Image (cartoon, rainbow, N blue to C red):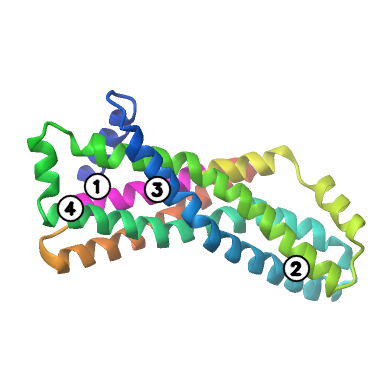
Amino acid sequence: MVGNFTLFLLSAISHIFRPPFHAREFMQAMFNIGWLSLPVVGMTAIFTGGALALQIYDGSSRFSVESVVPQIVAIGMVRELGPVLVGLMVAARVTSSIAAEIATMKVTEQIDALTTLSTHPMKYLVAPRVLAATLVVPILVGIGDIIGIYGGFVVATEQLGFNPATYIRNTADFLQPNDIISSLIKGGAFGAIAAIMGCYFGMHSGRGAQGVGQATKSSVQAAAVLILAANFLLTSLFFGS
């Protein structure tokens, strides 16, 4: 399986940079992965930011250092929780959708029809989705980071008694460019993983409804595990000693 996946990955990457480019499929993938994922990303981020502020305040109050809440919420959302949660939400929503769509096309022999019409399935189905996810998920991560920090800001100022101006100043002063860059790079990596897993398991699904269901389930599981593993590796790369 590792060998098949490696060949699939190399083929997908090579087709991204080789003509022709199917702009319509690419734009449709951008819309499905980006715009339609905004509601779930926004809801996940704002509640996570609010819960994070409450947890940090409760823990820091034991040591009388409640003033660190803005800084820890910001760094926690931008470095870790924002990219990981967005990646997992994309895996749950997009990876499953891609796998089910492509697996259904395989079962109904639409992929064979593409080949008959001299259209390479990797070029038409895989490359646009992988490229779109790699480009649009960092935008989702950036939006999720902002919404998550805002969720912590609302809870801290409305419920915990923080001064709004001081909270914003502490957040802005504490974040560094490296934090933001690492967050966006993680988003790109997680988006690529989510799309590639959906495409791979969709293209290699079994026949019938059971094959489609198995491909969908396996794609989400693989994407989630690989996203968490990639998060550890990228965190070690950016912030390891």
Residue 110 image position (x, y, % from top left): 13, 48
Tell me the SS state at disc 1. Answer: helix
Amino acid type assigned to the residue bearing label 3 in the image: Ile
Structural distance between the alpha carbons of marks 3 and 2: 30 Å
Q: Is residue 66 left or right of residue 53?
A: right
Mark 4 residue type: Met
- Residue identifier under label 3: 193
* Foreground of the two, 30 or 9: 30
Q: Quadrant of residue 101?
A: bottom left
Q: Which mark is residue 105?
A: 4
Q: Is residue 204 visible?
A: yes
Measured from the top left, where is residue 193 in percent x and y? 39, 48
Q: Residue at x 35, y 63 (%)?
A: 221
In the rendered structure, which disc, 3 or 2, sits on the residue that comes first in sequence? 2
- Dot 2, how many residues are within 10 Å of its Cα: few (below 14), some (14-19), or many (20+)? many
Which residue lies under the disc numbered 1?
2
> Where does residue 72 sit, x and y in percent of width and height?
76, 59
Visible residue check, residue 222: no
Q: Is residue 18 above or below residue 161?
A: above
Label whose residue precedes the other's in the sequence (4 or 1): 1
Q: Which portion, as a residue range, is magenta?
A: 188-203
Q: Amino acid at mark 1?
A: Val
Q: Disc 2 or disc 1, which is closer to the eye?
A: 2
